[in-house]
Amino acid sequence: MWFRTAPGRRPGSAGRRRGVSAGFTLIEVTLVVLIIGLLFGIAALKFDALTDGSRLGASAREIGSTVGVAYSQAVLAKQTQTLVFDTENQAYWIASETDPEGESGAGFLKKRGLYKGVTFKDVQVGAEVFEEKGLLRIDISPLGVSSSCMVHLVNESGSEMTVRVHPLTGTVSYYDEYVEYGADEEGGGFAD
């Protein structure tokens, strides 16, 4: 069998070109990587600023979910559950007789921390406001009843949010501001 090559070419040289560069130089690749890195850095700073308020809302919703789980656990297990707020370490959990520190639970039963930049401003139980750092425990009876509770959160930019827990039902309300629980003529209510 005979193979024929194109005129002017030697056998074995088909498809080879000499003197033509088929890639990028190291300087070009480095410049592109630096520009992409710079763009990602700027975008990350903007995204972090935009999410400051969303971290505040997410912290409030997670506290509300934990409260809902605590009420459910108290009624289903027919034993007292305790909401614990650690205002010094910006954490909270559901304490039970078998797990007082929230270390062995899973999901909302386990100790959780507030999101970055979010802190407890204070926790209000009934008419008493607890501003000092430390542990605050709120018991939920097996009947699903507790003291009224207001958790006030604040973020680095000074925005505040209130999580209100209804004492008889365990339902949670969220307010995009600091809301106080005050006494009125009927023995208790929200002050504006």
Image: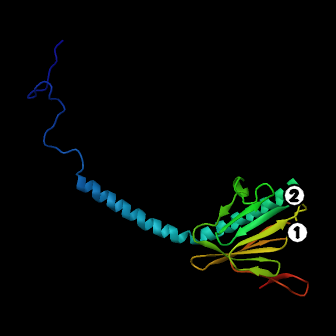
Tag 1: amino acid: Leu
Residue at 76% x, 81% y is 129
Residue type at tag 2: Gln
Q: Position of residue 100 (x, y in %)?
A: 76, 59
Looking at the figure, which quarter contains the C terminus? bottom right
Tag count in the figure?
Answer: 2
The numbered disc on residue 168 is 1
Q: Position of residue 62 (x, y in %)?
A: 69, 63
Residue 4 position, x and y percent, is: 15, 20
Label 2: few (<14), some or many (≥20) within 10 Å?
some
Q: Nearer the viewer, mark 2 or mark 1?
A: 2
Q: CA distance from mark 2 to mark 1?
A: 16 Å
Look at 77% across and 64% down and name the residue there: 67
Residue placed under numbered mark 2 in the picture:
79
Scheme by which the image is coloured:
rainbow
Q: Quadrant of the N terminus?
A: top left
